[in-house]
Amino acid sequence: MAQLVLGPVLRYVGETEAVVWVETDSQCTVSVLGAEQRTFAVEGHHYALVVIEGLEPGHGYEYEVHLDGKRRWPEPDSDFPASVIRTL
């Protein structure tokens, strides 16, 4: 079962779209807010850039990261607040 190595990292945010980057320990499908992307490999490392489209300007969206359908972020017992994408 795939695990997160690094991320999620919010790489870009606009008025109606955002891009989230992750590194995983194996090939998988990454999903964030209903958008999905297969990982790609470089020198044995697996990455995904998930483009999330159709967002509303000026809104905040709490999100989770799923790898092959299993939630991997946030961690179940995390004391940190939810991850949020805020559009421009």
Image: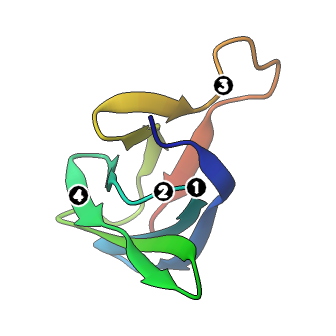
Residue type indicated by callout 3: Glu
Q: Residue furthest right?
A: 79
Residue 25 in the image: above or below residue 77: below
Residue type indicated by callout 1: Asp
The residue lying toward the viewer, choosing from 18 and 64, is 64
Disc 4 on helix, strand or loop?
Answer: strand
Residue type indicated by callout 2: Ser
* Residue found at x 37% / y 28%: 70
| Sequence-wise first label, 4 or 2 | 2
Residue 82 in the image: above or below residue 3: above
Is the residue marked by circle 1 packed among few (<14), some (14-19), or many (20+) residues within 10 Å? some
Disc 1 on helix, strand or loop?
Answer: loop
Is residue 81 in sight in this rendering?
Answer: yes
Q: Are marks 2 and 1 in contact (CB under 8 Å)?
A: yes
* Residue found at x 66% / y 58%: 7
Query: Would you say 52 lies left or right of 14 here?
Result: left
Mark 3–mark 2 Cα distance, whole angstroms, equals 18 Å
| Label disc, if present, on residue 26 of the rendered structure | 2
Is the residue marked by circle 4 packed among few (<14), some (14-19), or many (20+) residues within 10 Å? some
Residue at the spot of label 4: 36
Query: Would you say 40 lies left or right of 42 here?
Result: left
In the rendering, at what x and y percent does residue 25 appear? 58, 55
Residue type indicated by callout 4: Glu
Q: How is the image coloured?
A: rainbow
Residue at the spot of label 3: 75
Residue at the spot of label 1: 25
| Sequence-wise first label, 3 or 2 | 2
| Sequence-wise first label, 3 or 4 | 4
From the image, state whether disc 4 or disc 2 is nearer to you. 2
